[in-house]
Amino acid sequence: MSIKVGDYLRIQFLRYWWLVPLVFVIVAFDLYRSILQSFSLQDALIGILMYLVTAVVLMLFVFGVLLSMTAIAALLMSKQQRDVIYEFDERGFTIRDAGGAMLSYPWSLIRGAREDRRAFWLKTKRVMGFRYFPKRAFGQEELSALRALLIATLGTSARLKGK
């Protein structure tokens, strides 16, 4: 299976989506403070507009830079680096690329699994983050076998849609 640029963009966006509500909460508290300190309704409305414009521009800039850097990095990868093979068994899982690089995880390092419309997300322990496995990398039988393996291995920590 070949990893596409969209996979990398989806991973990065879903990793940092929580920044959007965080910025709006911070802006809302600051707006509330400025409204309490303003002398007139017009001053308060101008302040609100300035804060909202600043927050939106800042978020667009940050996400634009993040997504641009991710897309450039993904496009600079060789074809061998993008051709990936996923192997799952009772010991854990292994990710290999056509260039010979390999990454193995035992199940003891996996904290949980989540399935969405397009992929499986395996959350790792400590600071290793998560691993993303696009569903298009698997056939129907392999998807069923992977779901069964995740449920058998992770138990209630596996939140899967096709149980």
Image (spheres, helix red, strand yellow):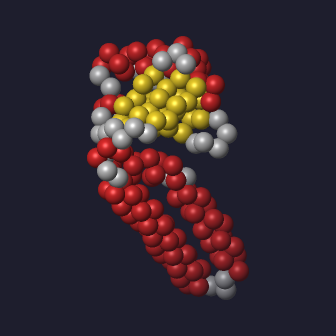
Q: Residue at x 31, y 43 (%)?
A: 80
Quarter holding residue 87: top left
Position of residue 62 measured from the top left corner of the image (x, y, whole percent): 48, 67
Image position of 144 (left or right of 36): left
Quarter holding residue 23: bottom right
82, above or below 89, in the image: below
Quarter holding residue 84: top left
Q: Is residue 68 or residue 79 the one in the foreground?
A: 79
Quadrant placement of the N terminus:
top left
Q: Residue at x 37, y 21 (%)?
A: 143
Label tally: 0
16, above or below 128, in the image: below
Position of residue 59 measured from the top left corner of the image (x, y, whole percent): 49, 66
Q: Is residue 123 or residue 78 the one in the foreground?
A: 78
Image position of 94 (left or right of 72): right
Image position of 37 (left or right of 84): right
Q: Residue at x 36, y 61 (%)?
A: 72
Q: Residue at x 59, y 58 (%)?
A: 22
Quadrant placement of the C terminus:
top left
Answer whether residue 56 is visible to the viewer in this image: no
Residue closest to the far front: 100
Position of residue 88 measured from the top left corner of the image (x, y, whole percent): 45, 22
Q: Is residue 9 or residue 60 the one in the foreground?
A: 9
Answer whether residue 7 is visible to the viewer in this image: yes
145, above or below 160, in the image: above
